[in-house]
């Protein structure tokens, strides 16, 4: 019983400690602090340093990080690994299999599947990154201010977020984007931001409410710190952890959502190159030419999996209850 109570008290101390302040490492009963090589007490790690220490020991973090880095590089410079244009097609090669210089074969229009798969990463990753950044900034700002000030501002935001939560994002995308001409990365990203911010806002609101009740915030307020200083220097750094976890996992979700909307014909539209567009055009030929569907669908699955793996690793590092 005493060991369980010690573990609980240690987890509570870590979870309530501010990001910029040191957190003592757990020690057994009566165990002295670990001395450094110079005979002095070892300086304890902060919450963020402790999280990085845990991340650096997880193989899943390095695997997902390398995959994401590769995807970002390919999205910026697709010509590094794919020559030619994704819009260069030859109907004489329609649905042909793999040949020399064309390892993924050709689609129904005679376009190189490998080149289109590589160039398709740009649109999908761009939508995911832009949508996640917009949702995180807007949701964190609105939710943080509501949690800090409370009152009528908090009540209004809660009712507005309830309304947006009642709109299924996929159904909303079909309705909203179907009336927009010429789907583009900007249009799809703005739609995701419009319907995606309430989730981050709720997370930010709860995190800020928890942080502002801590003793170090009360001490700063007693010393005369203003609202701007309280939010930027004391509350925001200690309320970011759950927001970062949710945003990291949501990035993969937005990439998958873009592919779904493009597959349905309301997201990105030709001549844009997207995995969702290629999957849609290949779905009717899955028996005759399965390679047309296999490669873009596989690239989409690996991309979403990489971001989910990264989100899981970050969550395990930042949540003391999971350590």
Image (tube, rainbow, N blue to C red):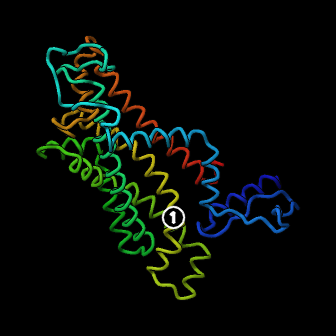
Residue 278 vertical placement versus 162 (above, below)? above
> What residue is shown at x 64% (from left), y 53% (from top)?
53
Above or below residue 8? Residue 289 is above
Q: In the figure, is residue 172 to the left or right of 202?
A: left
Determine which quarter of the picture holds residue 44. bottom right
Q: Which residue is mark 1?
A: 239
| Dot 1 alpha-carbon crowd within 10 angstroms: few under 14, some 14 to 19, many 20 or more | many
Q: Residue 119 versus residue 81: which sits nearer the camera?
A: 81
Secondary element under disc 1, as helix, strand or loop, is: helix
Q: Is residue 212 above or below residue 64?
A: below
Residue 55 at x, y percent in the picture = 60, 48
Nearer-the-camera pick, 302 or 224: 302
Residue 118: image location, x then y, percent: 32, 33
On screen, residue 160 versus residue 63, left or right, reads left
Looking at the image, residue 155 sits to the left or right of residue 173; the answer is: right
* Residue at 53% over, 38% down: 63
Residue at the spot x=33%, y=68% of the render? 156
């Amino acid at each position: 019983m005493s060991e369980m109570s010690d573990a609980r008290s240690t987890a509570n101390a870590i979870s309530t400690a501010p990001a910029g302040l040191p957190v003592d490492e757990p020690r057994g009963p009566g165990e002295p602090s670990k001395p450094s090589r110079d005979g002095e007490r070892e300086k304890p790690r902060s919450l963020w340093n402790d999280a990085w220490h845990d991340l650096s020991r997880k193989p899943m973090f390095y695997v997902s990080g390398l995959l994401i880095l590769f995807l970002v590089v390919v999205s910026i410079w697709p010509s590094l690994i794919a020559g030619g244009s994704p819009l260069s097609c030859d109907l004489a090669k329609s649905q042909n299999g793999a040949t020399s210089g064309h390892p993924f074969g050709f689609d129904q229009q005679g376009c190189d599947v490998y080149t289109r798969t590589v160039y398709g990463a740009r649109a999908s990753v761009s939508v995911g990154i832009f949508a996640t950044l917009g949702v995180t900034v807007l949701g964190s700002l609105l939710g943080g201010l509501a949690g800090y000030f409370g009152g009528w501002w908090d009540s209004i935001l809660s009712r507005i977020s309830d309304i947006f939560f009642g709109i299924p994002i996929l159904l909303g995308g079909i309705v909203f984007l179907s009336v927009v001409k010429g789907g583009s990365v900007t249009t799809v990203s703005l739609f995701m931001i419009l319907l995606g911010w309430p989730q981050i806002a709720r997370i930010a609101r709860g995190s800020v409410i928890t942080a502002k009740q801590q003793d170090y915030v009360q001490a700063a307020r007693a010393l005369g710190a203003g609202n701007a200083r309280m939010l930027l220097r004391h509350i925001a750094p200690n309320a970011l952890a759950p927001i970062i976890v949710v945003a990291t996992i949501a990035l993969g979700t937005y990439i998958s959502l873009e592919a779904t909307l493009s597959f349905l014909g309301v997201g990105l539209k030709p001549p844009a190159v997207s995995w969702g567009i290629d999957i849609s055009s290949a779905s009717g030929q899955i028996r005759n030419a399965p390679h047309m569907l296999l490669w873009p669908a596989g690239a989409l699955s690996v991309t979403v999996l990489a971001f989910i793996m990264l989100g899981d690793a970050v969550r395990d590092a930042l949540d003391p209850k999971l350590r």
